[in-house]
């Protein structure tokens, strides 16, 4: 059975189908990203008969209504949105939404004498040789004969009516130009559609399953899907560009009147940069929270009314699914929920987005928080479970790679079992003594500064209020928040001069600490025993060299909170391998103590 049909249809038919609601253009790529010159070039290509590429539509499955009748599913335009929107802008005169969320016209002009297109401007509007807006030519009331006579008279072209008329007819024939249409079968699964799309679409941005889900939501005009899509879209947009609130409200008057806007308005007053979700994140968290499923493909099927047992598509399931998804989105964007979850995230020591490499760690943390809250669990217990799960996930790389299957597995276990029991079982299996004493020590043997193990170490330092290396008052948290630098304990140039010139060796994370830049500059490329000798003089009251530590016990405490062995103060180049081994063990133990304190 063919998975898709390839045929062609005229520009006019496509525009008519969109107007009739037979083809939906989901607003997942808003705003319109083409500038006027690209619209002009597309018109020129159509005029000259050049190929402009295929568009791809995916037919929604037919759905059985509550009265037993069958409603034919509409087609969703999943690739070619920019081209079709450009054609509508130029030919129909439809306004587009620009990058400032303002509706505007992109007006394309045409010169019948030279047969060239241009973006209309004041000079063209004053030049009688130009048709300043070609959409007037395609209007049903346009009188070609009258136009040609008037045009020739105005431009002193008596006797040229036939030539101008041929050119005008060629322009008007753009509506009859055929475009290639790839129509994907309604029987295809979301996985198959994704695969086909990737294979067919060799240019542009490859859409994800979340994009297809947003297409499905956006194209719904029966169960409030498009408003739900706008809640997701605008919430994410406001988090990054809160100043656009007034512009969007002014240009989307219908949404401005809705309760949905009031539910997300609060975020325009915040300055959040630890967890800034994309629409994919909002969709994943909202869906998994209310449906207890982790695979976005299941969401597309549910919104289509899919009964997984009978394989029918039922209106009752579609309606219920859109309703539940809306509940999930509203729970996600709820100010109280979002802020309390962020407090839990920050209580783990995550004070900056740079400390979390996988967004899905924070996504599942929020899923877990909302799910446990729904169960009426005691707040202190929720905080403990969510905190530990976030850090456990980072330490074990739980959501790296193919995260969907793991998310699906985890939410089912947390839902079906006692959450605390499932967490403890997972801890026993994955955070055993062997993990802390051997596995984690080995994983700390890396030169990747963004390693989750080093990031968790920094989180532990933040949680324990550790100070920067050789700093009396400045904390690691302050250095991270102020975008401080990570420096080498055994200076890089010192190591290079002494034969340790492999990046993998001198950039070991066990050789990294956060310290003040001025301290690092003064240390330069001296051996540890040399610059620490000066620190010994400083604590003995014999000068000021680095930071403000003036007490030996305080110096020892500073070394301990940075997991630097005290013997380091007398080390030289030959001690470097031993130093790394010792510090990795200390770091692993430090992380373990930190994890156990999260309960």
Image: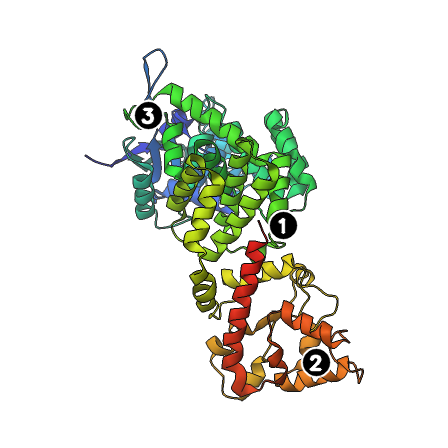
- Residue 31, given in percent of the width and then of the height, sits at 53, 40
- The answer to which of 126 and 161 lies nearer the viewer is 126
Residue drawn at x 43%, y 47% as measured from the top left:
425
Q: Is residue 480 above or below residue 86?
A: below
Single out the mark in the foreground, 1 or 3: 1
- The answer to which of 1 and 109 lies nearer the viewer is 1
Single out the mark in the foreground, 2 or 1: 1
- Residue 131, given in percent of the width and then of the height, sits at 51, 36
The answer to whether any part of residue 422 appears in the image is yes
Q: Residues within 10 Å of mark 2 (few under 14, many from 20)?
A: few
Look at the image and tell me in which quarter the N terminus lies: top left
Q: Is residue 219 above or below residue 583?
A: above
As drawn, the label of residue 347 is: 1
Horizontally, is 333 left or right of 427 in the view?
right
Q: Helix or strand or loop: what does disc 3 sit on? A: loop
Q: Helix or strand or loop: what does disc 1 sit on? A: helix
Mark 1–mark 3 distance (CA, rounded to whole Å): 42 Å
Colouring rule applied to residues: rainbow
Which numbered disc flags the more N-terminal residue, 1 or 3? 3
- Residue 533, given in percent of the width and then of the height, sits at 69, 85
Mark 2–mark 1 distance (CA, rounded to whole Å): 34 Å
Q: Helix or strand or loop: what does disc 2 sit on? A: helix
Residue highlighted by disc 3: 307
As drawn, the label of residue 522 is: 2
């Amino acid at each position: 059975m063919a998975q898709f049909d390839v045929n062609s249809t005229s520009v006019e038919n496509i525009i008519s189908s969109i107007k009739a609601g037979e083809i939906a253009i989901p607003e997942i790529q808003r705003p319109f990203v083409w500038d006027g010159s690209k619209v002009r070039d597309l018109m020129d290509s159509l005029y000259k008969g050049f190929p402009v590429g295929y568009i791809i539509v995916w037919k929604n499955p037919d759905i059985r209504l509550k009265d037993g009748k069958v409603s034919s599913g509409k087609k969703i335009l999943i690739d070619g949105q920019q081209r079709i929107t450009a054609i509508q802008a130029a030919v129909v005169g439809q306004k587009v939404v620009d990058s400032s969320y303002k509706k505007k016209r992109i007006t394309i002009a045409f010169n019948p004498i030279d047969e060239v297109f241009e973006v209309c401007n004041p000079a063209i509007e004053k030049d009688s040789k130009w048709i300043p807006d070609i959409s007037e030519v395609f209007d049903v009331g346009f009188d070609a004969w009258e136009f040609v006579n008037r045009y020739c008279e105005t431009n002193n072209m008596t006797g040229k009516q036939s030539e101008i008329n041929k050119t005008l007819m060629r322009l008007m024939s753009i509506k009859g130009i055929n475009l290639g249409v790839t129509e994907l079968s309604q029987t295809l699964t979301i996985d198959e559609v994704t695969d086909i799309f990737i294979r067919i679409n060799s240019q542009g941005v490859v859409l994800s399953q979340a994009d297809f889900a947003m297409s499905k939501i956006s194209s719904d005009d029966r169960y409030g899907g498009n408003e739900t899509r706008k809640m997701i879209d605008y919430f994410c947009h406001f988090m990054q560009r809160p100043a656009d609130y007034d512009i969007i409200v002014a240009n989307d008057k219908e949404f401005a009147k809705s309760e949905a806007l009031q539910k997300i308005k609060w975020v325009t007053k915040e300055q959040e940069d630890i967890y800034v979700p994309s629409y994919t994140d909002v969709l994943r968290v909202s869906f998994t929270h209310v449906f207890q499923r982790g695979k976005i493909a299941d969401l597309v099927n549910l919104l289509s009314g899919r009964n997984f047992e009978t394989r029918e598509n039922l209106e009752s399931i579609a309606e219920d699914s859109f309703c539940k998804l809306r509940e999930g989105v509203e729970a996600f964007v709820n100010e109280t929920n979002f802020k309390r979850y962020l407090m839990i995230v920050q209580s783990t020591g995550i004070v900056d987005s740079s400390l979390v490499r996988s967004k899905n760690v924070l996504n599942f943390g929020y899923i877990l928080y909302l799910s446990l809250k729904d169960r009426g669990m005691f707040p202190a217990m929720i905080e403990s479970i969510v905190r530990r799960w976030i850090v456990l996930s980072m330490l074990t790389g739980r959501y790296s790679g193919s995260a969907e299957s793991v998310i699906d597995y985890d939410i089912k276990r947390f839902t079906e079992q006692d959450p605390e029991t499932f967490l403890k079982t997972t801890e026993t299996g994955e955070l055993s003594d062997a993990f802390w004493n051997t596995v984690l020590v080995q994983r700390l043997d890396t030169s990747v500064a963004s390693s989750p193990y080093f990031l968790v170490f920094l989180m532990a330092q933040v949680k324990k209020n550790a100070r920067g290396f050789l700093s009396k008052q400045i904390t690691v948290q302050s250095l991270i928040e102020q975008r401080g630098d990570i420096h080498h304990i055994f200076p890089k140039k010192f190591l290079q001069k002494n034969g340790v010139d492999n990046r993998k060796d001198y950039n070991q994370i066990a050789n990294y600490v956060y310290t003040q830049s001025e301290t690092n500059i003064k240390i330069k490329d001296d051996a540890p025993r040399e610059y620490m000798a000066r620190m010994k003089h400083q604590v003995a009251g014999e000068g000021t060299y680095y930071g403000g530590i003036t007490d030996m016990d305080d110096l020892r405490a500073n070394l301990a909170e940075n997991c630097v062995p005290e013997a380091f103060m007398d080390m030289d180049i030959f001690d470097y391998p031993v130093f790394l081994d010792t510090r990795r063990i200390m770091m692993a133990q430090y992380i373990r103590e930190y994890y156990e304190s999260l309960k």
